[in-house]
Amino acid sequence: MFTLNCKGSLWIIKSPQVMGIINATPDSFYKGSRTANIELALSLANSMIQEGAAIIDIGGQSTRPNSELVSESEEIDRVVPVIEAIHKAFPFTYISIDTYYPKVAQMAVKAGASLVNDISGGRFYSEMLSTVANLNVPYICMHSTGTIDSLHEKTIEDSITPAVVNYFKERVDACNKAGIKDLILDPGFGFGKTNDQNFQLLKEMGALQIFGLPILLGVSRKSMIYKTLHISADEALNGTTVLNTIGLLNHACILRVHDVKEAVETVRLMAYLKK
């Protein structure tokens, strides 16, 4: 069981939770997660909450390969109105902001977000960790390598799982020294890893239990599924469910997904199986 302090509200995680993805972007790799306006974002959030999502993850910038870099100010313009609207409509649903910009994190939390989800693990901007600590919200720290411009370059030649464990040893220490109280670890599937490394890491993900922290699994409709099966992202729901099941067997605590209903059903069936 994990307890996270989300701006004074305790998120008590007794069983695996589902995080729904909403992208305030025109170019995220899966079109089903894109929202062109606030009304569409509210409709999508409502559907996800009704289907069982405990948290909604909102991003304003695509991090797929070859995506266009969005400035800090433009990202704020994209995400803040969406967060404000969703928080007003669904005040008891947790919202995370998917960003590596410290200022975006500040503005998003002010607008209603209560977690920060950072693909850089605080590496891109030195003030990110202190910003999150001052905001006093949980921090999702993802494994990645390289810079903003080289996120998807395959740079790890050694065994992937020890490399990820060593990365988190350093990052968890940095987060603790910055004063961040609540941490979630994301192995970063699809970021700077070969297809074989992605599957090896999924198989060995239980190694991350050494940190005693919640583990977030984000494989939803990613290329490790659709490239392996020679299909498209639109056709990758079944593969997502399979890998989510494997992730739950390997101690995933949060499933970050585009398709909430199917993920919630997976969690329920796994719970029944264990019972």
Image (cartoon, helix red, strand yellow):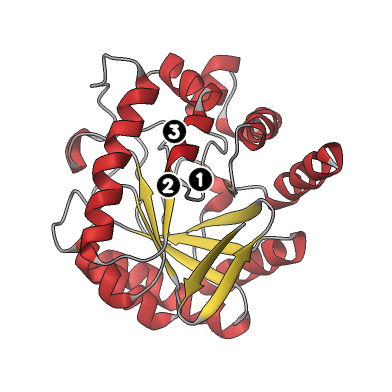
* Nearest the eye: 137 or 50: 137
Q: Residue at x 49, y 63 (%)?
A: 36
Q: Give the residue type at disc 1.
A: Ile
Quarter the N terminus occupies: bottom right
Q: Distance from label 3 to label 1 (Cα)?
A: 12 Å
User: Which mark, residue 104?
Assistant: none
Secondary element under disc 1, as helix, strand or loop, is: loop
Secondary element under disc 3, as helix, strand or loop, is: loop
* Residue farthest to the bottom, as pictured: 88
Residue ID for mark 1 = 215
Vertical arrangement, residue 218 with respect to residue 17, above or below? above
Vertical arrangement, residue 194 with respect to residue 109, above or below? above
Instruction: Give the side of residue 14 with respect to residue 168, left or right.
Output: right
Q: Residue at x 48, y 47 (%)?
A: 212
Secondary element under disc 2, as helix, strand or loop, is: strand
Q: Estimate the x, y position of residue 121 in percent, counting from the top left.
A: 28, 49
Q: Distance from label 2 to label 1 (Cα)?
A: 5 Å
Mark 3 or 1: the one toward you: 1
Q: Residue at x 28, y 70 (%)?
A: 133
Vertical arrangement, residue 231 with respect to residue 31, above or below? above
Q: Earlier in the sequence, mark 2 or mark 1?
A: 2
* Residue farthest to the left, as pictured: 126
Q: Is residue 111 visible?
A: yes
Q: Residues within 10 Å of mark 3 (few under 14, many from 20)?
A: many
Q: Residues within 10 Å of mark 2 (few under 14, many from 20)?
A: many
Residue ID for mark 3 = 189
- Circles 3 and 2, Cβ within 8 Å, touching? The answer is no
Q: Give the residue type at disc 3.
A: Phe
Q: Earlier in the sequence, mark 3 or mark 1?
A: 3
Quarter the C terminus occupies: top right
Residue ID for mark 2 = 185
